[in-house]
Image (cartoon, grey):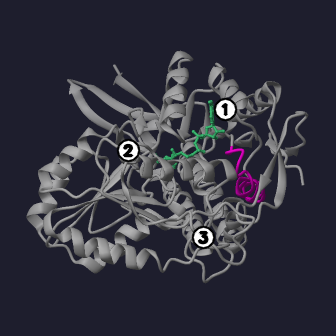
Amino acid sequence: MRLKNYINGQWVESRSSQVLDVRNPATDEVLAEVPLSTIDEVGEAIKAARDGFEQWRQTPPLTRARYLFRLKDLLEERLEEISRLLVQEHGKTLAEARGEVRRGIENVEVASGIPSLMMGSNMEDIAKGIDCESIRQPIGVFCVIPPFNFPFMVPLWFVPYAIACGNTCIVKPSEQVPLSQNILFQTMHEAGFPRGVVNLVNGAKEAVDALLESDEVNGASFVGSSAVARYVYQKAAVHGKRAQCLGGAKNFLVVMPDADLDTAVDGIIGSAFGCAGERCLAGSIVLPVGDVYEALKAKLVQASSQIKVGNGLDERVDMGPVISRRHRDRVLGYIENGVEEGARLLLDGRKLDGDGLRNGWFVGPTIFDEVRPEMVIANEDIFGPVLGIIKVRDLDEALRIIDANPYGNATAIFTGSGKWAREFKYRVRCGMVGINVGVPAPMSFFTFTGWKGSFFGDLHAHGRDAIEFFTEKKVVTVRWV
Ligand code: NAD
């Protein structure tokens, strides 16, 4: 099956001669072919979005919300179908895929509140007989450029808010995992959005560049690695667009001596090995404080060695493969680097055998002890199931290590003490903080607040920031004589 683009309310075959295979990472089976759309095709999508804008912005917010209600109902009906497809295109487990679809739908739910969310403010008598009002207006056309790791959910961090606010948009899915976006757009087609409101263009760098260089596109929402996030942010700025660019991560998990160890171990393992470590909120380094170190280490290794690796469609499996052969080799490269730099392997994910693992890109849970802050594995975004342990003396030392890291997406502390928790929350320079929670993922009605090298922009994804990002303010000062 060769995937189509969705432009101006219609499915259209791409004319591109460049095509990639979409492979199931658990079996290496080819699931579909994805075209890398040409600059002209991107231009057609931009034109459709631009042509659809005026009528859509004049559609009352309540009516716009009703399309989203319909979309939500249709997505609920297809939850299982989408989840199974996600497992096949991405490799995550069914439970993880269902969670992803649920989180995606929640953004549609929240954006359905647009009549309240988009209200402005006003004040009488700012001077004698003069009133003032501040209103929010849609801006125009937005593009959405997601990464491979949450193929269904990440576009929904942006699209529902963009269109609820009265903009039109174009999604360029990750070329590695375009299938669940194909279903999302089929569902949006069924929901009956007017022509040009939502458009899908398959492709890669060339398509992204065409979107960013177009004067007809007003803004960009990007999620991916920090190097590309920075590039997209800079290019968007050069071409006069607003941009929110979410980048990579290196997340540290602190365990205080007074932590409940079972809660900490569950939280750390779920964080480090959930979605095979391919989450921007994945815990990557554990910082045990003082004498909790030995007991924590033993429990972590014991629990991690029970994780069942395999094809995510099997409900007994806890962890699926990583996305591709190339990415598997990259993760294995980091493990080799850790060994060369002198970290001690407590659990070696390279040693995997078992039925059904031969054709896929599997890496088992891997734990390194005696990691030092200056090592490569302590600093870089590995994006695989590799966890390092750096023993620290006290909370100050833990905070210094976290602070020195260029990323600032998420972090967590495990403790029984409100005092430690408050101090950590107050001082740590990261945007998303868990207290006895290993994956502190904000729900859709809060914002997704990466800091430092994990984010380029001012207004973050979903929550209130989304309404700010997808609207422009206009202030009207009124005197009637
Ligand atoms: P990536 O940067 O390789 O690709 C992301 C998107 O950018 C894709 O759609 C891709 O087609 C496009 N792209 C890739 N190279 C490009 C280039 N040179 N020019 C223009 N466009 C380009 O990221 P990925 O490997 O798909 O995703 C994994 C990364 O995403 C990890 O670093 C992870 O931490 C990050 N991530 C961050 C968050 C967050 O919220 N901060 C969430 C999920 C994933």
Please say whether residue 186 is one of the residues in the magenta stretch: yes
Q: List the residue tagged with mark 1.
A: 54
Dominant SS in magenta: helix
Q: Earlier in the sequence, mark 1 or mark 3?
A: 1
Look at the picture and state if 42 lies above or below 3. Answer: above
Q: In this rendered view, identify the residue nearer to me: 330 or 111.
A: 330
The three-letter code of the residue at mark 3 reads Leu
Label of residue 301 in the image: none
User: Quadrant of the rendered structure where residue 146 is?
Assistant: top right
Task: For marks 2 and 3, give the one nearer the viewer.
Answer: 3
Residue 352 - label: 3
Q: Could you tell me which residue is drawn at 20 percent across and 23 percent down?
A: 128
Range of residues picked out in magenta: 173-190
Where is mark 2, residue-wise?
Answer: 450
Nearest to N terminus: mark 1 or mark 2: 1
Q: Can residue 72 be spotted in the picture?
A: yes
Query: x%, y% of residue 356?
Result: 72, 74
Q: How many labels does the image show?
A: 3
Residue extending farthest to the top is 238
The reply, left or right, for residue 72 in relation to residue 118 is right
Q: Left or right: where does residue 260 sit relative to residue 85?
A: left
Say if mark 1 contacts mark 3, CB within 8 Å. no
Q: In this view, does 100 lie above or below 209?
A: below
Q: Which residue lies furthest to the bottom in this view?
A: 316
